[in-house]
Amino acid sequence: MLRHAGRSPSAGRLLDSHPPRGKTAAMIVSDARGADAIRPHIAHGPAHDPVMTHDPVIALEHVYKTFNDQVAVKDLTFSVQRGEVVALVGQTGAGKSTALNLILGQIKPTSGTVSYTHLDVYKRQQSDRLIPWRTACKNVELGLEILHFPKQKRRASAQEWLARVKLADVHHDKYPHQMSGGMRQRVSLARALVVDPDLVLLDESFSQLDQVTSKTLRGDFLALIKQLKKTCVFITHRIEDALEMADRVFVLAAPGEIKLEIKVSDADRGNPAFMTEAVSRIAGAMAAGLHLAEGTTGR
């Protein structure tokens, strides 16, 4: 277990910290339940009940992060189980990106701790960030090149993963400018998964696609994540994305506080009453936090 710690409020000293290391670290309930299964979790500073799971692979405990004395994340406490998909949803300035970067280890908490098992991590950002002078297949091979896989193995693995993300063979040798936005995102996801990371972090990865393409790609990606038993944490401002993909949804509001937790099962997704109530509760929690955003710098 690695622990990434900030300045302890009680000890008043900087604790040792170690960011997650692995092959890749790149900038990239079964029963049906009704609406009464949605239970709000309101964060009220250090006294609130932690949103923790048993035997987590990631755990944030009373994490605060400030930038130039402005609070971006306040008393953030939650954990993630291996194989779980967790969504952090909120308006711009709610602290979503800060939370994701704390998990990745790119920034240190001002106080509190971020703990994790030894994970290989891949972060996907909003844009596909494909290399323009490399074909789809060569873009997917990139991580394997860095890991010194032999050329033949790289090519075979890249082609296999392009097929698994449902990109037709005819597009494998195309350059990014020759592909649609949805195709490029499929290539980017194949590049993320070909290196077999334990944890995938998504930063608004479907937000720049049209509604139909986004919905299709979300479904395909989620099916792969579940099949491979990968752990995934993603941030989004779109309620639909969160409810369609996540096992648990956390609503953040400025300055980076958890205002609501909702657990979602496949049976829940097929229950219109549950989904309608969930959308209403999430939208309400997001709206309630908007007036707090003025004068804060949650990211």
Image (cartoon, rainbow, N blue to C red):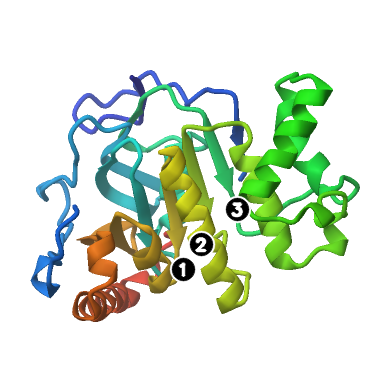
Image coordinates of residue 18 in percent, x first then y, are 44, 21
Label 2 sits on a secondary structure element that is helix
Left or right placement of residue 84 versus residue 241 in this view: left
Left or right placement of residue 257 versus residue 36 in this view: right
Residue drawn at x 63%, y 71% is 209
Residue in the foreground of this view, choosing between 13 and 191: 191
Residue at mark 2: 218
Q: Which mark is residue 92?
A: 1
Residue drawn at x 10%, y 48% is 49
Question: How much space separates mark 1 and mark 3, taking CA atoms?
Answer: 15 Å
Q: Of callouts 1 and 3, which one flags the residue occurring earlier in the amino acid sequence? A: 1
Residue drawn at x 46%, y 68% is 92
Quarter of the image where one finds residue 206: bottom right
Image coordinates of residue 6 in percent, x first then y, are 35, 31
Label 3 sits on a secondary structure element that is loop
The three-letter amino acid code for the residue at tag 3 is Gln
Q: Which mark is residue 125?
A: 3
The three-letter amino acid code for the residue at tag 2 is Arg
Q: In the displayed structure, would residue 171 be above or below residue 200?
A: below
Residue in the foreground of this view, choosing between 97 and 73: 97
Quarter of the image where one finds residue 157: top right
Q: Of callouts 1 and 2, which one flags the residue occurring earlier in the amino acid sequence? A: 1
Q: Of callouts 2 and 3, which one flags the residue occurring earlier in the amino acid sequence? A: 3
Residue drawn at x 62%, y 31% is 195
